[in-house]
Amino acid sequence: MSRICFSRNLKELADLLPEGKQVVVLYDKAVSEWVKKTGLPADLSIGLEGGETLKQWDAVARVVDRFMNAAVDRSWFLVGIGGGTVCDFAGFLASIYMRGISFGFVPTTLIAQVDAALGGKNGIHFGSYKNILGCIVQPAWIFCDPDLLRSLPLREFRCGLAECVKHGAIVSEPYFRFIEEEVAGYDPAELPDATLDRLVRDSQQIKMDIVEKDLYEQGERRALNFGHTFGHAMAAEEPSLSHGQVVSKGMVMASRLAVRKGLLEKAECERLEKVLARCGLETEYPYPENRLLPYILHDKKRQTNYIWLVLLRRIGQYMIVKEPVDSFGL
Ligand SMILES: NC(=O)c1ccc[n+]([C@@H]2O[C@H](COP(=O)([O-])OP(=O)(O)OC[C@H]3O[C@@H](n4cnc5c(N)ncnc54)[C@H](O)[C@@H]3O)[C@@H](O)[C@H]2O)c1
Ligand SMILES: [Zn+2]
């Protein structure tokens, strides 16, 4: 498993580089000032525009060209610095270039620090098919400086909060309560360092505990998809919606379904809705739910005749139900 180095001391980043290897750095231009401050020794450094358009073949091809021109080979080490899109892109490229070179991540958004940089899933889109080309390869390390989150636009911070709430909702009521009491409803810019640190570190711990038990998503790792089956369908229907917003709405939709199935108390569902709303996230899908059905049936997590759906029993406890596609209704 990857080593996580959580630190505000930028010198520790250079210490993570393997001795004697040449280094290629792929970084999001949005954090170029921070990258300069690190003084990271790079033999090749490539600035990228972060965002979903990066996760496409043509961007991979352009960077491979730069690698070939600089004679990057398997002995090099790659560092990916940026949000979830840069981590996904850099991890994918590192995993396929010359059959794989070692790499480390510096996640710079809340989504990337608590989710995308952890667990080894790397991938890109193919046209409008999201995350359809990918692999599971672990980074050697993840360097996490929570101060990077201080420059994050509010909208991006909120998206990350949706994943933090998800982590609490599925396995940790105390972490969920911490978000309710110390994070939701507060201006992120004013969160004390200790609160920001706990927000990130506990969330990382929850994800890593799950991933370690089920690297290839045969069982428990599926819990991390809570809210995502419906959320991905909403994003497919309306691509302009951000990941955090659709995950938020998707968790609420799944929880209302669990209430209807008699699996979850209504009060627990309302507790989830309330914390998401106080985090500045949307909770309502404004159309009839069965509009999502065609998109759900195209979800890549679907296995021939059924889909796995993550539902809550209570805050801090999930269950996975296997729904046959032909009887699947919302
Ligand atoms: N591999 C996984 O397990 C996994 C898990 C969750 C999400 N993801 C992927 O992550 C992506 C979403 O990640 P994201 O929300 O970080 O998106 P992102 O990389 O597009 O970053 C969001 C925006 O913030 C900017 N930015 C990055 N760091 C910044 C900083 N410190 N200060 C100011 N601006 C900054 C970026 O340039 C971008 O405009 C999606 O493509 C999703 O599929 C992957
Ligand atoms: Zn997600």
Image (cartoon, rainbow, N blue to C red):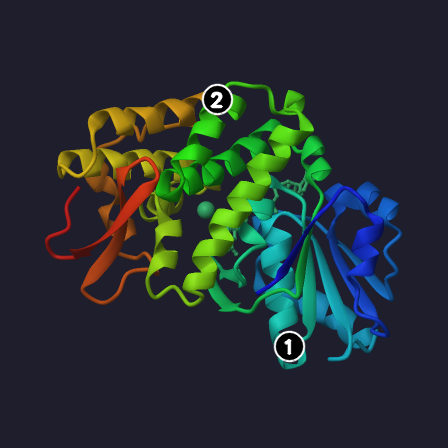
Which residue is the site of mark 1? 100
Picture quarter with the C terminus: top left
- Name the residue at 57% across, 60% down: 56
- Would you say 286 lies left or right of 325 here? right
Which is nearer the eye, 3 or 236? 3
Report whether 171 appears left or right of 262. right
Categorize mark 1 by other alpha carbons within 10 Å: few (<14), some (14-19), many (20+). some
User: Disc count in the image?
Assistant: 2
Is there a contact, CB below 8 Å, between mark 2 and mark 1? no
Residue 265 image position (x, y, % from top left): 20, 30
The single residue placed furthest to the left in the displayed view is 327
Which of the pair 161/128 is nearer the observer? 161
Mark 1: secondary structure: loop
Q: Is residue 237 visible?
A: no
Residue linked to disc 2: 181
Image quadrant assignment for residue 37: top right
